[in-house]
Image: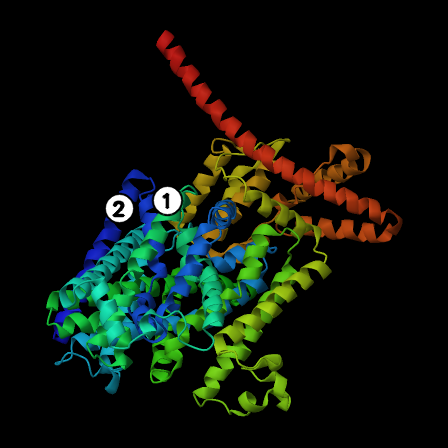
Amino acid sequence: MFSSITVILVISSYMVILFAIAQLVERKIEQTGRNFNGPWTYALSLAVYHTSWTFYGSVGFASESGLLYLGVYIGSLLSIACWWITLRRMVLAKNTFRVTSIADFISTRYNRSQKIAALVTITALLGVLPYIALQLKAVISSFKIITLSGHGADLHNTTMDWGSSGLLITLFMIVFTIMFGVRRLDPTERHQGMISVLMVECIVKLIAFLSIGIFVCYYLFNGYNDILNQLDQAGIHQVTSLHTRPDSGVMWLTLIILSFAAVQNLPRQFHVAVIENADVNYIKRALWVFPLYILLINIFVIPIAGAGLLKGIDTGAADYYVLLLPQQADNTFLTMLAFIGGFSAATGMIIITTMTLATMCSNHLIMPVLEKFERYAAIRGELLKIRWALVTLILLSSYSFAIAFSDSYILVAIGLISFVAVLQFSPALLGGIFWQKGNSAGALAGLLAGFVIWVYTLVIPTLIKQGWMADALLTEGLFQISWLRPEALFGTEGLSSIPHSVLWSMIFNIGAYLLGSLLYSPHKSERTLTAEFMQSMHHQASKTARPTGLEQYILLETKLKEASALLNNYLSPDKARNAISQITEDLQVTDKERISIIELIEFHRMLEHTLTGSIGAASAHNAMENGIRYTSRETADLKALYSHLVTEMDTRIDNKPTTKHGDTNFGLIDDLQRQISLLERKNLSQQQQLEKLELKLEERHQQIFKYRIAAQHAQRDKHKLSEQLQTLQQISE
């Protein structure tokens, strides 16, 4: 219907328009310095959740399994209904701790554990990379359909062209991802231009799908009811059936569970919903706009699926009925619109997911290695180029995966397999925001157990069926133990692979998380960070300065040079300079020559938060420990402060004093904590009393956290009143 050159020109023109929109938004932000994207942009961009699997695959799913496809969206709607409780907490914590991804969020909650961050990253990479392959397959398949000389109905009997066109489209995706998401390094990891583009793509794919639905219902047929009546007369009942398979009930429950978790756990979804959120109140708009979008993009799934079957189009091409129906009717405009809609659905997912995975890999897999070996120090400043290389590697790996599995059943089910992978984040993520006793040992144990079961019950059987491994394990079980068969673990016969994997991975994951958290007693440093993390989810973070005290004797210029040297390892000189300037302004020390020890602690704390935005919390913490030093007097003052607090704890129990552990950072306080722990072990007779005091200490820490926020607001109000007073004095004069 179209020549390859025509389609490529249309794609290129479309992406040029989107790039122009992104540039315009970013330029407006630079000129005004204000947030450009509002609640509507935020709410609509969340529809990146709907990929080509929704645009094309839902119709194919419905043509075979009927209304079962709705399970994916019922679970999503239930999850969205809880957003004011769950998502709101995550956004507030993100504002306080400057997290950059779901891996960073989970690791920050659990004592900034680099191991947890790396495990989440690896799980996301292995689970989601094949899902990117599915999007590439959708784009390449749709490209082939509209460039066929015929009507594409024989698609099922033709071979997929993974040659020049497939590679060209993959290279397009690499360029688009770098242009929109990884063009420059942003310490906040927010990409407002990209989110504006994402909103446009979400609107385009919705308009395209609704247009095809209206065309099918009211041009090819006489309405929605006419299609349903003809399906009934033709004996095609599976399209409108609730139960099309023996395990329909189990599959309904499985799909609801998977989608409930996926709408928050998918790396792209977490990035858009949490990281790109500029105002927690935007969630209120999303609470009704996003469900409305889900309803609209699914309203014509059944008519399109039914129309494709009634028109006699090969059921093997059911995934592409959205394209084939207007093509069969010789409607070139709607055919191209459908292609652009599917292209938007796929590219939106590819760009966001690849960018997010590249960020996670660089922060939690690459940077820890570079930090450990000094000979790689020069590479730290090439973080942006590292991410470009990772984007290229991720997309080429997805392309290779798609080629390897192009004729396999696995690409059909890959969406659900990916959902099972990200489901493994739920116990640590949800447990972390609601259960204060959850700790790093439990989170690591749960994530590791869930990952192992997912690999054993889904990934290994896939490789076996692909012929890459011997099938003895599948038929006989591990060590020839029948109840260790990957698809019938512990004798659970009769379950299909997805429900089976969900069942056992969640049993092991949740069980290990609970057991590890209850058996392991975390160090005081982790308990302190946990208390502050939990507290942060109930208060909006403020950027104003915090109360300071003590003698001002520390030369600020020296500390600024040290901070600049550290930031220059990861950020450009301009961004490093602006970040330090912003910190000194927020602390209100810009015009000071000397600062106090408490101000220094706050300066280092805010410096770490800035660095966190670029390399993640765990890597930033390690970089601060390696790059920041205290003088002997500063160390002595910190010890004196800590000693004073310990003395107060012993002599004035009722006052419940608190340590500032969360503020000191960079090794010194950890050393002091170890000394205190040693003293506690030597004084076994006082163990019970110390436990009670520690509980009171944590309670007081929460109270002081509230006080600091209140003090910040009070200081800001004082500043406003001072300005008003000066204005009145000028008027009176």
Q: Secondary structure at mark 1?
A: helix
Q: Nearer the viewer, residue 479 or 35?
A: 479
Q: What residue is rendered at 49% in x and 23% in y?
A: 718
Question: Residue 52 falls in which quadrant of the image?
Answer: bottom left
Decide: few, some or many residues near mark 1? Use Cα within 10 Å; few <14, some 14-19, many ≥20. Answer: some
Q: Nearer the viewer, residue 76 or 45?
A: 76
What is the x, y in percent for residue 400? 36, 80
Decide: few, some or many residues near mark 2? Use Cα within 10 Å; few <14, some 14-19, many ≥20. Answer: few
Dot 2 or dot 1: first in sequence order is 2
Residue topped by disc 2: 27
* 92 shown above or below 324: above
- Can you see residue 407? yes
Q: Which mark is residue 285?
A: 1
Q: Amino acid at mark 1?
A: Arg
Q: Nearer the viewer, residue 127 or 721?
A: 127
Q: Amino acid at mark 2?
A: Arg
* Marks 2, 1: nearer the viewer: 1
Q: Residue furthest right?
A: 685
